[in-house]
């Protein structure tokens, strides 16, 4: 069963390697776990529902609690402390587009706000109900997720928007295809959620981001159903797909999604290579992506993230053996780790690997990298479970991500990390900060920063440590000329910074679009704008 106050399946544990706790203590101090509220205690605090009875709506406290929050740090603090300020008044699990329309009519009649809910993995407050006079209805789309059609000649598949990542891949792989969209939340996030937040998968270098994979579909808005036709290309005015992409439930509920799929690759391999220093590594990956070396992914870790990843990976003896070998070849404490993948036919993979060897010829440890690459694949969707383990040890984890041009990457990393250190220094706390470039483009790169810090003496003190950091880091992103979100959307946490990117006229256009599809303002209000 899904954890009600943390990440993932409650039967899955991610143990902390034996040296990791000492590593963290040395960097941020000894942590003390908090006493969390129990499920029974929080259920007792769920108020009565304000929604009238409806056969499709579940008003039970447990369903309302399980749909009250996502996976942001404020969400965790609310659930772990038991101080959840607002709950949906009811949760519906529609099984068809027709039931979604019935529920939208019901919500309009009773004056309810509607929150579309995919996998509950949002880290930016997308699914959090507002406190207010209007009741809230959450539509859990998990039962609208079957494979509806697959045109193998055109390589277009149509799914219900509630299909989770594993269901999408299982349905396609049975027919010899893949979507190739693998965000870290892959186990639980949904196709509709990916479209609504403009998600990016780990292998977007080969398959593209979700905007490249989204071909069309159907959106149910309060004023009617919007059909989004799919064409290979079109010059017929503005693309309505773009209006839906990143709309975060403000226009309506995605019920059906058409996606561009690819044949399953014949072979796929992942490798690790180390560079002697950061500047050498950045130049190598920039050269590779601008030269169109046909890799399926590249992820480059800074010196501090490389060190952290090797500690958290465990396998102390094996990692020690690697580090001794790397040191003999000139890669000491300043080394940086690159994870990259090759995907395609056997011939394509051989050619891509040959080109990668040439592009990364300054790197060292290349031949030692296959084993570590396999370990990365085995754990790439398990790493979020480490948040549960760390919280229980007394540590909180949060991430920030942006994208910027190559000439601003270095300043962006320094700006974000300095802002985070400054925010924690002002409250007399240590913080461990590390960064990687998670997606690479000819124009620039995404910058993904993780910070790890001690929980406060109580839950609200933890939030009080996080809030100044989040504000300072977000302002640093804007000041350095980055987008406020590369892959997680806007929600409530990034809403204040959107205008800096869109401008006055742009914000007005977004607001006008929302009013057109939702004149009553019932669709996920308070998110995005």
Image: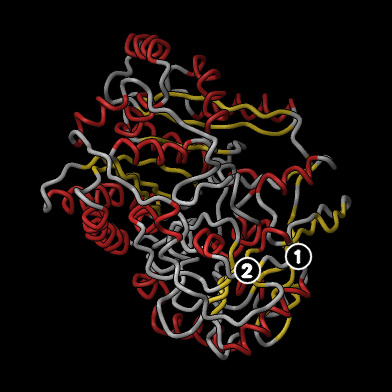
**Percent coordinates x, y for residue 100 in the rendering:** 71, 74
Visible residue check, residue 404: no
At horizontal 50% and vertical 21% (from top left) the residue drawn is: 372
Left or right? Give the position of 524 relative to 500: right
- Callout 2: SS: strand
Examine the image and state in which quarter residue 463 appears: bottom left
From the image, which quarter does the C terminus lie in? bottom left
Towards the viewer: 325 or 24: 24
Q: Nearer the viewer, mark 1 or mark 2?
A: 2
Towards the viewer: 90 or 128: 90
At horizontal 53% and vertical 34% (from top left) the residue drawn is: 12
Examine the image and state in which quarter residue 522 appears: bottom right
At horizontal 31% and vertical 45% (from top left) the residue drawn is: 396
Note whether 75 is above or below 529 in the view shown.
Answer: above
Q: Residues within 10 Å of mark 1 (few under 14, many from 20)?
A: some
Q: Which residue, given by chain and number where applicable, does mark 2 sit on?
A: 58
Examine the image and state in which quarter residue 481 appears: bottom left
At horizontal 44% and vertical 81% (from top left) the residue drawn is: 507
- Callout 1: SS: loop
**Percent coordinates x, y for residue 417 in the rendering:** 25, 47
**Percent coordinates x, y for residue 197 in the rendering:** 54, 62
Q: Residues within 10 Å of mark 2 (few under 14, many from 20)?
A: many
As measured in the structure, the alpha-carbon distance from the residue carrying label 1 to the one carrying label 2 is 14 Å
Towards the viewer: 446 or 386: 386
Q: Which residue, given by chain and number where applicable, does mark 1 sit on?
A: 95
Left or right? Give the position of 71 relative to 141: left
């Amino acid at each position: 069963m899904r954890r009600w106050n943390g990440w993932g399946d409650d039967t899955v544990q991610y143990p902390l390697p034996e040296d990791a706790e000492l590593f963290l203590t040395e960097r941020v101090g000894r942590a003390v776990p908090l006493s969390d509220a129990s499920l029974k205690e929080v259920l007792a605090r769920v108020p009565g529902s304000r929604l009238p009875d409806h056969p499709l709506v579940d008003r039970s406290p447990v369903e309302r609690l399980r749909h009250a929050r996502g996976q942001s740090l404020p969400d965790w603090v609310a659930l772990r402390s038991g101080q959840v300020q607002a709950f949906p008044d009811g949760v519906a699990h529609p099984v068809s587009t027709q039931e979604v329309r019935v529920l939208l009519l019901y919500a309009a009649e009773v004056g309810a706000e509607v929150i579309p809910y995919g996998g509950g993995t949002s880290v930016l407050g997308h699914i959090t109900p507002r406190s207010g006079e209007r009741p809230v209805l959450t539509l859990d789309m998990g039962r609208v997720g079957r494979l509806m059609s697959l045109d193998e000649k055109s390589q277009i598949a149509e799914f219900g928007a509630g299909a989770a990542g594993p269901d999408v891949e299982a349905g396609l792989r049975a027919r010899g295809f893949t979507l190739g969209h693998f965000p870290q939340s892959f186990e639980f996030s949904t196709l509709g959620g990916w479209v609504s937040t403009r998600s990016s998968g780990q292998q977007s270098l080969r398959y593209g981001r979700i905007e490249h994979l989204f071909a069309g579909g159907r959106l149910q808005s309060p004023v009617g159903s919007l059909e989004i036709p799919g064409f290979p290309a079109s010059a017929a005015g503005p693309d309505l797909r773009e209006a839906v992409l990143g709309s975060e439930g403000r226009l309506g509920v995605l019920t059906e999604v058409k996606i561009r799929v690819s044949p399953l690759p014949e072979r796929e391999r992942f490798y690790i290579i180390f560079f002697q220093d950061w500047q050498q590594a950045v130049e190598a990956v920039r050269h590779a992506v601008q030269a169109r070396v046909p890799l399926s992914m590249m992820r480059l870790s800074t010196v501090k993230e490389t060190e952290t990843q090797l500690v958290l990976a465990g396998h102390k003896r094996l990692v020690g053996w690697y580090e001794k070998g790397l040191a003999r070849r000139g890669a000491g404490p300043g080394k940086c780790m690159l994870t990259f993948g090759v995907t395609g036919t056997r011939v394509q993979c051989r050619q891509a690997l040959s080109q990668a060897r040439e592009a990364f010829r300054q790197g060292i440890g290349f031949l030692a990298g296959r084993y570590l690459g396999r370990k990365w694949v085995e754990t790439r969707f398990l790493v979020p479970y480490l948040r549960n383990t760390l919280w229980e040890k007394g540590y909180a984890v949060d991430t920030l991500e942006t994208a910027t041009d190559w000439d601003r990457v270095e300043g962006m990393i320094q700006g974000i990390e300095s802002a985070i250190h400054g925010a924690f220094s002002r409250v007399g706390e240590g913080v461990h900060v590390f960064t990687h470039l998670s997606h690479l483009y000819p124009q620039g790169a995404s910058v993904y920063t993780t910070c790890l810090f001690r929980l406060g003496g109580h839950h609200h003190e933890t939030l009080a440590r996080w809030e100044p950091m989040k504000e300072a880091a977000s302002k640093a992103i804007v000041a350095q000329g980055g987008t406020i979100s590369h892959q997680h959307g806007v929600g409530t946490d990034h809403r204040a910074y959107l205008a800096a990117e869109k401008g006055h006229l742009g914000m007005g256009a977004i607001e006008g679009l929302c009013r057109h599809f939702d004149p009553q303002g019932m669709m996920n209000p308070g998110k995005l704008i």
